[in-house]
Image (cartoon, rainbow, N blue to C red):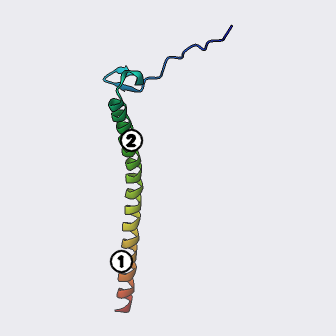
Amino acid sequence: MAKTKDKQPSKPLLKLDDQDYFKEDFSDEQIRMVAHLENVESKLQSNGFINEQLGVTKEALIEMLRKSINEKEEVKDELE
């Protein structure tokens, strides 16, 4: 007697407006739209992380510039 595997329920591809949608229910075009949405979400998260990094870097560069300007002005004052 051949063993049969119990078919596991598939995981929802998407939850939209409190409703689960499964890949089997979507057309190829709809599956591609979901892939685009996932890609956009990933980019938004990545850009948020990059935004934090750039903000910290910007502040560090501003502080470095201030320090450099102040040091230059101190030297100028000493020479006068």
Residue receiving disc 2? 39
Q: Using the image as rendered, state which of residue 41 and residue 70 is in the foreground.
A: 41
Q: How many marks?
A: 2
Q: Secondary structure at mark 1?
A: helix
Please tell me whether mark 2 sits on a helix, a strand or a loop.
Answer: helix
What is the residue that sits farthest to the front in this orientation? 1
Q: Position of residue 79 (x, y in %)?
A: 37, 92
Q: Position of residue 55 (x, y in %)?
A: 37, 57
Q: Could you tell which of marks 2 and 1 lies nearer the N-terminus? A: 2
Name the residue located 41 percent from the left edge and 70 percent from the top edge.
64
Q: Is residue 56 above or below residue 8?
A: below
**Disc marking residue 69:** 1
Question: What label sits on residue 53 in the rendered view?
Answer: none
Question: Mark 2 against mark 1, which lies toward the viewer?
Answer: 2
Instruction: Give the crowd class for mark 2: few <14, some 14-19, many >=20 residues within 10 Å.
Output: few
The residue lying at 41 percent from left, 25 percent from top is: 23
Residue type marked 1 = Ile
The residue shown at (54%, 15%) is 7
39 to the left or right of 10 = left
- Above or below — where is 57 with respect to 22? below
